[in-house]
Amino acid sequence: MDVLDRVEARLLVVDDEPNIRELLSASLRLSGFEVMTAADGREAVQFAERIRPDLVVLDVMLPDMDGFAVAGRLREMGGQMPVLFLTARDGTDDKVTGLKVADDYVTKPFSLEEVLARIRAVLRRTRGDLDLPVRLRVGDLELDEEAHQVWKGGAMVRLSPTEFKLLHYFMINTGRVLSKAQILDHVWNYDFGGDAGVVESYVSYLRRKIDTAEPRLIHTLRGVGYVLRPPQSD
Amino acid sequence: MDVLDRVEARLLVVDDEPNIRELLSASLRLSGFEVMTAADGREAVQFAERIRPDLVVLDVMLPDMDGFAVAGRLREMGGQMPVLFLTARDGTDDKVTGLKVADDYVTKPFSLEEVLARIRAVLRRTRGDLDLPVRLRVGDLELDEEAHQVWKGGAMVRLSPTEFKLLHYFMINTGRVLSKAQILDHVWNYDFGGDAGVVESYVSYLRRKIDTAEPRLIHTLRGVGYVLRPPQSD
DNA sequence: CCTGGCTCTCAGGAAACGTTCAGCCGATGC
DNA sequence: GCATCGGCTGAACGTTTCCTGAGAGCCAGG
């Protein structure tokens, strides 16, 4: 739901679990990407050959061949095609092996924010896309994605990982109302079973750290959600 | 409510409850869409293959296969076919969590306004239809759907969710007379049992917030309904 | 083993919201 | 001019929604 006037890039999502595939492809499309999906390695290689995606999101565990093999084939095809791996959390040192072939990886269960951030980072690196800013700014709030750091009025603020992801999501969507469900779906892992109460708690934490003074940035819209609004548009 | 010289898009509505199916298809047709309906997943896939709708409105709970499965089949057919899901409110549904992410879902019981807004939003995103504006404007009244915000003469106005939906309905139908029954049907959830008195109350609230000064925008037509009319065309 | 930070749950209280209702007012029709 | 009807609006109610403090469970580091 972000940038919309143009296609940011063409992606190929490869995963054998249909719901993960759907989850990813649907929300990547919403974020402005053109997305194709494949369910196994053979299909992946086939599609990649045909459509030449700008990036491949690739599950490590596939029914026919494993992710590394697929990545190898992709590499052989030439025309650099960066790969973002999806790995299970427990797999202890899949990661190490994988990272040599992959440009980055995300562990399952992931949150959409994580995946999106990684995809953007990889694209930025590989095509030197600098129109996707690393530094977000709203009012006197500043957030550096790469440094994972936040400033309020020039002063650095310490945020926990979740607080950071939440604020990041808010800042990417400045001016747009975000429902609690939406926030939950983007910031929390997809397998999170709890209810939207957490979101309230974390909004509360965030406010305490970065939004105590007037003019307020994070606004509650009862029965609808929250918005991060730059000042003066009040 | 209708824009009507042309068909906005071709839709496929899939729900096993006949009354919901009828409710939706009738009012979507009135809004200028071309609508086909299916009662279960099998039928849905069949029809979708044949008529290639621009968007599918899909109930998650179907007698034969669930929404995920259907969506998967649709996706496999190629030619991106966005899906708007209908889900029960109860929330703690595992299946649903995945769908929600897509962000294009509406919970039952819904109001027609909600469904229409979502459909338009999805179509806008997927086909880059920017002729359906996000920002509505009538006189010195301005409404931003995404930001869920309203301005009167440049000044921001706080509206409750229902007030907002009502005003939105008025603005989409500028210049058209809306009966109280019609308003009730579109703005309130379809299972609302109360009488049209609420509408009067809310029109009153709205007027107090955005229509206190001359020239008046919201006019009462005794025994008929209300109209939102731009100034000077009086 | 203890400590501290982080995440999540829960519950109390406060405010906003939706709905109903009754009394009033203006318009309409006789 | 009068009676009637429909619409307006303030007050009141129960309900929902949100905020926040307190605390339990968990993990990592010391």
Image (tube, coloured by chain):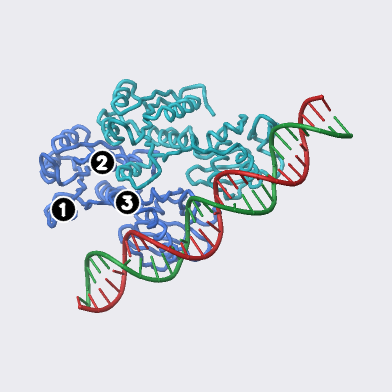
Chain colours: A blue, B cyan, C red, D green
Q: Which is in the foreground here, disc 1 or disc 3?
A: 3
The chain identifier of the residue carrying mark 3 reads A
Q: Which is more N-terminal, label 2 or label 1?
A: 2
C1 or A63, nearer to the observer:
C1
Q: Which is more N-terminal, label 2 or label 3?
A: 2
Q: Residues within 10 Å of mark 2 (few under 14, many from 20)?
A: some
Asked which secondary structure carries label 1, the reply is: helix
Tell me which corner region of the image, top left, top right, bottom left or bottom right, holds residue A81: top left
Tell me which corner region of the image, top left, top right, bottom left or bottom right, holds residue B34: top left
Asked which secondary structure carries label 3, the reply is: helix
The residues bearing labels 1 and 3 have C-alpha atoms spaced at a distance of 21 Å
D18 or A215, nearer to the observer:
D18
The numbered disc on residue A99 is: 1
A170 or B184, nearer to the observer:
B184
Three-letter amino acid code of the residue under disc 1: Leu
Which percent across, then down, holds residue B7? 46, 23
The numbered disc on residue A113 is: 3
Three-letter amino acid code of the residue under disc 3: Glu
Q: Residue at x 26, y 34 (%)?
A: B69
Q: Which residue is mark 2?
A: A19
Q: Residue at x 55, y 56 (%)?
A: A232
The residues bearing labels 3 and 2 have C-alpha atoms spaced at a distance of 17 Å
Q: Which is in the foreground here, disc 1 or disc 2?
A: 2
Q: Is residue A173 above or below residue B173?
A: below
**Badge 3 vs badge 2, beta-carbon distance below 8 Å:** no
The residues bearing labels 1 and 2 have C-alpha atoms spaced at a distance of 25 Å
Quarter of the image containing the C terminus of chain B?
top right
Q: Are marks 1 and 2 on the same chain?
A: yes
